[in-house]
């Protein structure tokens, strides 16, 4: 079980209450005109509270546009002065932090490429000692909750209590409709471990393309995200970085207007019915646990039988039959094939461990389990 992060948070800094915080702006600050015009149009929607723009851009290969650097920071200062929007930039080194603070950037964020490296995170944490500024921490590239938690803890231990996490999806080797697979179960688990930690969903980096932004934004809202980060550019098709996932301020306004914001609780009648259904789920879960316990008792009996008869060969034909048979039955009952296979594999792994314990207690080499 994943241990709870040791975080001391101060949530009164959160810029909005009620509705999710909307952070928007271009992937990269390219020119002063592009930055200020985008900010002006975003502010005019009345829906955006924080203006984001990349000043230092980490590129996979040299030769690409790596941002305007410190030259762009005065542009962000003008954004705040002219529109009233708060500003945020990504920082990846102590030098970036120093420069951003010198131009009164309101919020810092730490990118996925930096979060994967504990040494880099420790350097940033040291640079933030004694600084009172909100810091947003993106999830690492890989689906590693402990690594994400570790980054949050390092920043928190440096004295930063104004912290939020950014869910921007995870690198996924299999074919996927997303640029970065959302793997919603990971931010949900983080929220379970730290209920007071705000989590912002970066739908632009999850999607990687415009046509599914609305769908993922609604999904994030339905999962009670605390904010959305959405890239917006006055001329997305000609943006120097990530043009396919950026939208115009007008398109952003339409996207946000199309979202359905749900309430966490309903009428007394609704709550009564919901509680009744949850009680039924609790009852079913109890029955499932009893069935699993009975199943494991039989697994132990099989293990002892193998031990007595010196059987050490995995019965692959039996395992294949179980997968095919259970998935076929589950599919007929309306269950997802992928879920069924994952569930069977987890049960199989637990069976193996139990039978290994039986053999190790007798000082013998454990066979593979027959489930």
Image (spheres, grey):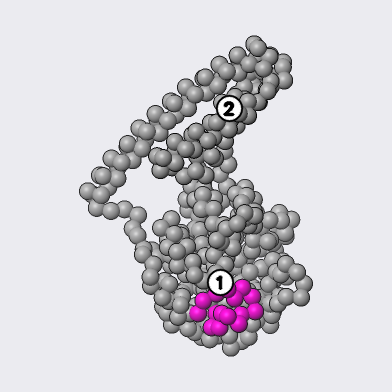
- Categorize mark 2 by other alpha carbons within 10 Å: few (<14), some (14-19), many (20+): few
Q: Which residues are magenta?
A: 233-248
Question: Which is the main secondary structure of the residues drawn in magenta?
Answer: loop
**Seen in the image, is 177 located left or right of residue 263?**
right
- Residue 311 percent location from the top left of the image: 67, 17
Q: Which residue is the site of mark 2?
A: 318
Q: Is residue 243 magenta?
A: yes
Residue 81 visible? The answer is: no
- Up-down relation of residue 288 to residue 167 (above or below): above
**Seen in the image, is 249 located left or right of residue 176?**
left
Q: Which residue is the site of mark 1?
A: 245
* First of labels 1, 2 by sequence position: 1
For the residue pair 298 and 106, the one nearer the viewer reads as 298
Q: Is residue 10 magenta?
A: no
- Up-down relation of residue 3 to residue 293 (above or below): below
- Residue 292 percent location from the top left of the image: 47, 27
For the residue pair 140 and 81, the one nearer the viewer reads as 140
Q: Closer to the camera: disc 1 or disc 2?
A: 2
For the residue pair 261 and 358, the one nearer the viewer reads as 358
Residue name at image x 63 percent, y 57 percent: 171
- Up-down relation of residue 53 to residue 21 (above or below): below
Q: Secondary structure at mark 1?
A: helix
- Up-down relation of residue 89 to residue 147 (above or below): below
């Amino acid at each position: 079980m994943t241990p709870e992060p040791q975080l001391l948070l101060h949530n009164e800094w959160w810029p909005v209450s009620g509705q999710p915080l909307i952070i928007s702006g271009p992937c990269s600050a390219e020119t002063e005109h592009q930055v200020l015009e985008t900010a002006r149009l975003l502010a005019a929607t009345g829906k955006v509270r924080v203006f984001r723009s990349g000043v230092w851009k980490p590129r996979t290969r040299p030769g690409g546009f790596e941002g305007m650097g410190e030259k762009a920071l005065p542009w962000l200062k003008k954004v705040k002065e002219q529109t009233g929007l708060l500003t945020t930039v990504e920082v990846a080194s102590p030098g970036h932090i120093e420069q951003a603070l010198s131009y009164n950037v309101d919020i810092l964020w730490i990118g996925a490429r930096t979060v994967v490296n504990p040494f880099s995170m420790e350097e940033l944490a040291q640079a933030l000692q004694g600084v009172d500024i909100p810091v947003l921490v993106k999830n690492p590239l890989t689906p590693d909750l402990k690594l994400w938690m570790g980054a949050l803890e390092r920043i928190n231990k440096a004295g930063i209590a104004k912290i939020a996490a950014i869910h921007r999806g995870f690198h996924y080797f299999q074919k996927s409709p997303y640029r970065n697979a959302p793997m919603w179960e990971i931010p949900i688990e983080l929220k379970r471990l730290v209920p007071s930690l705000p989590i912002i969903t970066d739908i632009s980096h999850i999607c990687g393309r415009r046509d599914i932004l609305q769908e993922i934004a609604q999904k994030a809202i339905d999962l009670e995200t605390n904010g959305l980060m959405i890239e917006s550019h006055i001329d997305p098709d000609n943006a120097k970085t990530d043009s396919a996932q950026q939208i115009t301020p007008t398109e952003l306004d339409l996207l946000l207007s199309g979202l359905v914001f749900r309430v966490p609780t309903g009428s007394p009648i609704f709550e009564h019915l919901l509680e009744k259904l949850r009680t039924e789920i609790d009852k079913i879960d109890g029955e499932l646990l009893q069935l699993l316990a009975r199943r494991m008792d039989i697994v132990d009996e099989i293990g002892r039988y193998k031990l007595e008869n010196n059987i050490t060969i995995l019965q692959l034909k039996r395992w294949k039959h179980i997968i095919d048979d259970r998935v076929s039955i589950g599919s007929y009952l309306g269950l997802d094939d992928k879920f069924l296979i994952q569930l069977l594999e987890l049960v199989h792994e637990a069976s193996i461990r139990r039978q290994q314990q039986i053999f190790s207690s007798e000082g013998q080499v454990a066979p593979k389990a027959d489930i």
